[in-house]
Amino acid sequence: MIRSSTFAGQRVAVFGLGGSGLASAQSLIAGGAEVIAWDDGEAGRSAAARADPPIPLGDLREADWSGIAALVLAPGVPLTHPEPHWVVRLAQAETERRRVNRHVDHLPAIEIIGDVELFCRERSAFSGGVHNVVPFIAITGTNGKSTTTALISHILRAAGRDVQMGGNIGVPILALEPLARGRFYVIETSSFQIDLTPSLAPTVGVLLNITPDHLDRHGTLLDYARIKARLIEGAVLPVVGSDAAPMLADIASLDDRPLPFDASDLISGSRVAPIHVADGRLNVQRSGSPDTFEIVADLRGVGSLRGAHNGENAAAAFAALRTFLEPHVIVQHMATFPGLAHRLERVGVVGDVWFVNDSKATNADSTEMALRAYPREVLWIVGGKPKDGGIDSLRPFFHGIVRAYVIGEASGAFAATLDGQVDVVRCGTLDVAVARAAADAAAYARREPFPGATGYRGPAEPAPIVLLSPACASFDQFANFEKRGDAFRALVAKLPGFVAAADAAASTPASQPRT
């Protein structure tokens, strides 16, 4: 655990007692703060009461706010949109009272912050403000941030560095191992977390891309992008995806402030930038020669980095790490990256048919990345709790889908979108979809047509892929996308003839680049 000593001796309110909220409260208590914690749900309050030591609880509606220095807010609690949560309004009201009475009590405003902000303050105090004493690599983006976080962590660990990985992926940031000289913190950061981190100043800040998401929490796309941009504005070394750069330039112009990056900071997974991937090869611009590039890695045989979106992730990892590692070391360990669970994760093979778990694709943009990586011979399991826009944006990729197996609340709407372009089987639940897709894929692999299929496998076509890429949230049938992916894995593992990916021969066709 990282102790938050910067609020020692002060009273701090903590609201939202999920994983990050509990870790925040425990960190503050260990650092000497007086904590009063609350959650709207009984489960969170019960977890706080069971903690060791127990976290002091108190209904913040009834609390005396006059002595509270800060409100530490869990990232899932609305700060501004669609409207401030009641606890935010209470903190704001106390701040306004102090402003009006500042000549009497001389109290500063109540800070409304999150767990990443506590980490940043503790890191600054520990290192005396010297950024490289405790290297901090922060990654954000609408898509790809989890894979990039895991890839950077993998490369550093394989190179013998002391690495802690967490934040929006896995372990809450304050539950990681204590700060130490030379210990790397590789942290995935969501827009919600960035919004609660005013002193965010990582050693390396990676902003991969910006597409519409969480607009119910941020209001507009521009406001969402402004929040994402704060990660690179405070970074010593910014790394920016080429697709995000035009929007960042627009924001700089609208807000009349300097652009937070320059051309040398740009990376891309598909087109020319100082660091980019083209035809599966990682290209790096030669120093002093903007039109000359050197191929530093061939990623075509790295199954976990298939597709243009993973090219962007690989380019970002290279850009983020070349300050710390020699290029050949980065490339060497990039090739051994096993991939991220639930993100284009090859579960295993039955005969010639590979099964791919992309449960983390909770929106159409993420599923687009999967369909770009697997552009042909796909038996697609799709559906769940739909998001705005559905799958209409995926129409350009329908030609590569042999058959779609729709599940969950989205079944009717998705079947209507696919009608006339892709054959659809309404399965309802994941177990039915896996069984039906496995049977159809086996017939398709044998080049046998089956009723209703868009076509059948030609002699030159690659082996089929059964792809779970839902383009939906999981909450209609599963607690989260991890549970959905775990269920898919378990169902596939029970299929007759199943061979796990780790045991499958490297020469299996699906492990090769697909075009």
Image: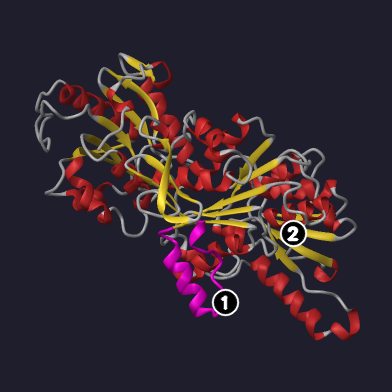
Q: Does 88 lie within the magenta span?
A: no
Q: Nearer the viewer, residue 146 or 250?
A: 250
Where is residue 497 shown, x and y percent of the image? 31, 13
Q: Can you say whether 198 is above or below 208 in the image?
A: below
Q: Earlier in the sequence, mark 2 or mark 1?
A: 2
Is residue 16 at all visible to an observer of this figure? yes
Task: Classify the position of the N terminus by image quarter.
Answer: top right
Say what secondary structure mark 2 lies in: loop
Where is residue 197 shown, x and y percent of the image? 66, 61
Where is residue 430 shown, x and y percent of the image? 34, 34
Q: Quadrant of residue 434?
A: top left
Q: Can you say whether 76 is above or below 168 in the image?
A: below
Q: Does 254 lie within the magenta span?
A: yes
Which residue in the protein does label 1 denote? 257
Q: Can you say whether 169 is above or below 94 in the image?
A: above
Q: Residue furthest front?
A: 288
Q: Amino acid at mark 2?
A: Asp
Q: Say whether residue 292 is left or right of residue 394.
A: right
Disc 2 residue crowd, few under 14, some 14–19, many 20+, Cα 10 Å: few
How far, Cα to Cα, is label 2 from label 1?
42 Å
Q: Quadrant of residue 48?
A: top right
**Residue interval drawn in magenta:** 242-265
Q: Quadrant of residue 150?
A: top right
- Image point (41%, 27%), residue name: 489
Which residue in the protein does label 2 denote? 59
Q: Nearer the viewer, residue 90 or 456?
A: 456
Disc 1 residue crowd, few under 14, some 14–19, many 20+, Cα 10 Å: few
